Image (cartoon, grey):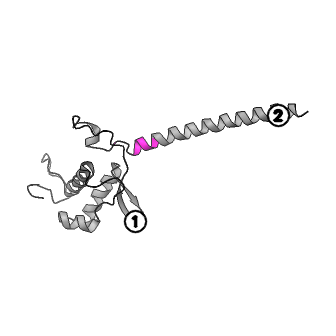
Amino acid sequence: MTGVVVARRGRRPAGSGVPLTFEVIAAAVRERIQSGRIQPGDPLPTQSSLMREFGASSLTVQKAMALLKQEGWAVSRPGKGAFVAHHDHAADNADDLDGPETTAPVGGTTARVQALERALAEAVQQIADLRARVEALESGGGERGR
């Protein structure tokens, strides 16, 4: 990490544009994911390895990991660690470098919730259709048996 100026305190100097250490760490891990060096489902670097690599405290690394999780890049598995979240990086357009996929993963938390809501609505509709069929068969079948 040569040539990168990082603010060492938790407060950014007004108007400086200098990234805080946790932002630098999150950006570096995000870049590794986007470049494919770390694949969906792979474990993320450990807290201690990131602390060594960036000369950061455990709290700073925890803030970076929290940011990655908040953005949908990482997921935690209790007792196992942090892993790269699974995403649909559709075609990763090299022409569209300003698109949302350069700053946030496609299929993040909001998209997953929406997909689950759609699937739930479809399941509810299928149950209602099946219930109507059963009722029709029971009412029709009862009359046939007489």
Q: Amino acid at mark 1?
A: Lys
Q: Residue at x 46, y 39 (%)?
A: 114
Which residue extends farthest left?
A: 3
Residue 142, how many percent across, how many down?
Answer: 85, 34
Report which residue position mark 2 lands on.
Answer: 141
Residue 89, how many percent across, how many down?
Answer: 32, 43
Q: Secondary structure at mark 1?
A: loop
> Which circle marks residue 123 in the picture?
none
Q: Residue at x 64, y 39 (%)?
A: 127
Q: Which residues are magenta?
A: 106-113
**Image depth: mark 1 or mark 2 in front:** 2
**How would you rate the neighbour count of disc 1 (Cα within 10 Å): few for under 14, some for 14-19, many for 20 or more?**
few
Q: Is residue 108 magenta?
A: yes
Please state if 118 lies on the left or on the right of 131 as rendered: left
Q: Earlier in the sequence, mark 1 or mark 2?
A: 1
Q: Quadrant of the N terminus?
A: bottom left
Residue 14, how many percent across, how many down?
Answer: 15, 48
Q: Main secondary structure of the magenta part?
A: helix
Query: Above or below — where is 119 with respect to 62?
Result: above
Query: Above or below — where is 128 with respect to 19?
Result: above
Q: Between residue 62 and residue 72, name the one nearer to us.
A: 72
**How would you rate the neighbour count of disc 2 (Cα within 10 Å): few for under 14, some for 14-19, many for 20 or more?**
few
Q: Residue at x 22, y 53 (%)?
A: 23
Please state if 109 lies on the left or on the right of 60 as rendered: right
Report which residue position mark 1 lands on.
Answer: 80
